[in-house]
Amino acid sequence: MDVVLLSRLQFAVTALYHFLFVPLTLGLSLILVITECVYVMTGRTIWRDITKFWGALFGINFAMGVATGITMEFQFGTNWAYYAHYVGDVFGAPLAIEGLMAFFLEATLVGLFFFGWDRLSKVGHLIVTAGVAIGSNFSALWILIANGWMQFPVGAKFNPDTMRMEVSDFMAVLFNPVAQAKFVHTVAAGYVTGSVFVLAISALYLLQKRHRPLALRSMTVAASFGLASALCVIVLGDESGYTASVNQKMKIAAIEAMWNTEPAPASFTLIGIPDREGRKTDYAVKIPWVLGLITTRSIDKQVPGIDDLVKLADTRIRSGLLAYETLAKLRSDRNNAALRAQLHEHVDDLGYALLLKRFRPDVEHASEADIARAAQSTIPNVPVLFWSFRLMVACGFWFVLLFGAAFYLAATRQLVRYRWFLVAAVLSLPLPWIAAELGWIVAEYGRQPWVIEGVLPTALGVSSTAAGNVLFSLLGFVVFYSGLAVADLYLMIKYVRLGPDQTIGHPVAAPRDMVAA
Amino acid sequence: MSYELLRLVWWALLGVLLIAFAVTDGFDLGSAALLPYVARNDNERRQVINTIGPVWEGNQVWFVLGGGAIFAAWPALYAASFSGFYLAMFAVLAALIFRPLSIIYRSKLSDPRWRGWWDWTFFVTGIIPALIFGVAFGNLFLGVPFGFDADLRFHSTITLLSLLRPFPLLTGLLSLSMLTLHGATWLTLKSDGPVSARARAAIPVFAGAFIVLFVLAGIWLLALDGYVITSSLSHDSDSNPMLKTVILVPRGWLLNAGLHPALWLAPLLALSGAFAAILLRDRPLLSFLGSALACAATIATAGLALFPFLLPSSSEPDSSLTVWDASSSKLTLEIMLGAVLIFLPLILAYTAWVYRVMRGPVRARDFSGDPGAY
């Protein structure tokens, strides 16, 4: 296997793994703020114990999130060195600001969350908990600003003297519409994950007829927080679809398995079987108008299909080749103004010429066949995207139903009345993780063959390191991470089984009032 | 602010971040390295771990932030050092993944095999990064084989074994003794009873080792060739590390100190810090500040000697990365400096607050009844 494939595999494995822990941190940290707020405001100690119990589970998860997150930052340097050189000027800044503004805050304060109960005032401790939650959420903001730029590289331009992308407008990077939509979509998905986690474990306790005061209260918090978040995920997911349609038309077309441009407004394929060879989608069940409405917010604009986008890529590759050739001439004649002007004209397509590097290193001698192959290579894996997207969306709608029911039952104090509801809540536990991983696949696998959309092909971003090294580290990660997953799950299950009384070291405070249920 | 000054400021900030990492996370690593010696039973081991329990997570962020700052301000250095030192980085990474978990997971179960495994992990993951950071610094003085092609794509023939040369191994031990000393002064300050007494007894041993290794490394430097830029190199131009010439000069790393004798203060302070740690070991806070000074001044010594080099190339010296041709664009350096000026004071403030809240030594009663403790 070559370095590109191994590095991509390693990134995918470590990112998907890291993302098992992040959403729960995001959601649970806010739920802790909510429950502790209730404690501070009402003074009822049961809410402190609720905070402590979910806090213990939060701690186990948080450690894994932090530990596996460092891998992500390192990999841009170890495995994607040319990427780091090529876009570090733009991409590095949000990562560094994430450290300064967010990661430092959450990591410094999280120690006090566990060790500060007796050393801080009630309000003081609440501020610490809020600091951890704010830190985690701002962390997500900066990471998604960085990621949003990979999808929609605004506010930067290519500098031929340094052979890299450089920031030209930082505000554009910051307020990138893709990043903003992604941020809310992702953190809201995290809140859903936290809510499902609390809902499912509380439902389990109710089914087992134990820890009822804690379970009922936790469930009520999870139901309301979860319902708001689940709705938010869907609305902002739709917004992500719209922003993607501005510059990632190929991703949209692939998700929809839309081979040919349809007359506006395009119909949405609810389900079907995409056929990559035949370039058609069999057994498609279509809903008229919906795709056009979602992606263009209009009824008259067209959504381009895959075949038309390949033709467009072909044109851009030819234009990019002109930029590439001019760049080569500039190296020996650095101050030639005419060459610089010529480069400027085609530089936006330079990335498309770099697509050819996968097929031949001497890009300037590319044949017609090479250009055709490079243009074809801009099509991502259609069936994988098609199905990942649909499963993710199905999960999203299920969460709205689940939390809607939970909210209604909590509001009418019937949470323990229907066994089927509690069973459904418990069985839903794995779904937010599945949805989150699928979402990552849609966003990042759907970006292929680009690592920076339209600017840098993934295959070019790798380090010039020996394949053996990458294989070694990849195997290392698989072994380490599998072991850690076992330890993490074991501890989680153990603490859930032990229940809150033993987890926090004393019986959960008895409620002052009995909740009718 | 001129591009030249911005680059200087960012070079200094890089030093500040490395020093902050060594001074804070350094005692975490050092405490881990001392675990088998200072703690003889389960309660004592928990005492050691709980001294760093509330703060290690924040401390480790200095390293993460250091990585982020190199990425944003010195992307060429980030690409070259992280991919060039691939397997060494992987080892550091493995240590950074396992060390936190050994702290958090260890006391969650009472099975002695479980605890024994995590104690061993804690010890090893304390030593490995301390050694590797020192070895990496030693290699900067010798240069490593790398270069760039016309697209500025980094290539190198560095292997893990090729990094383990005599001088870097010496600096690796130097780094290990320095951080273990720092761990010893920390544990003297933050624990009580036998753990504190054993840590106190370890101070002269590791401070002595540090002083001997530091002087040895200094003498060795006299025999090494240093890298010197011989062509003109604009301090204000776009970053491209291919536009200069560099040669090797005997005793080249002493040239900076020859030009500016005040730079000799750095090594002097490093040694004074270690002596202070020994002499003031009955006043634990001062002793701890002494070892912190030793860490800070040692990093400053290395940085000032290497200046303006960040990563010299032994195979293609002209491609060496320097302060003047490996930075981000002026705009990025400005934006990042703004972010640092806003957030660094905040970080220092809340970090200081956390240390204040958790002040005083950790005693057995602080953790024995608390299931949240490590």
Image (cartoon, coloured by chain):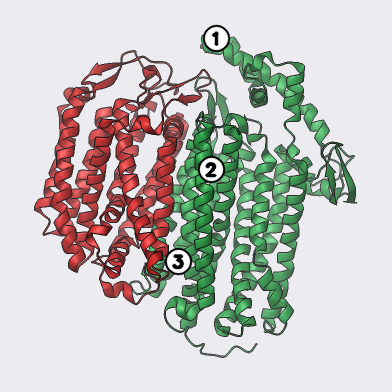
Q: Please indicate, yes or no, whether residue B86 appears anywhere in the rendered image.
A: yes
Q: Is residue A276 above or below residue A221?
A: above
The C terminus of chain B: image quadrant: bottom left
Which numbered dot is residue A336?
Answer: 1
Pointer 3 local density, CA inside 10 Å: few below 14, some 14–19, many at least 20:
many
Percent position of residue B97, x then y: 44, 52
Mark 3 or mark 1, earlier in chain: 3
Three-letter residue code for mark 1: Asn
| SS state under label 1 | loop
Note the chain letter of the red one. Answer: B
Q: Nearer the viewer, mark 3 or mark 1?
A: 3
Percent position of residue A438, x then y: 68, 52
Residue that badge 2 annotates: A474
Distance between mark 3 and mark 1 Cα atoms: 59 Å
| Among the 4 quarters of the image, the one containing residue A443 | top right
Three-letter residue code for mark 2: Leu
The subunit letter for the residue under badge 2 reads: A
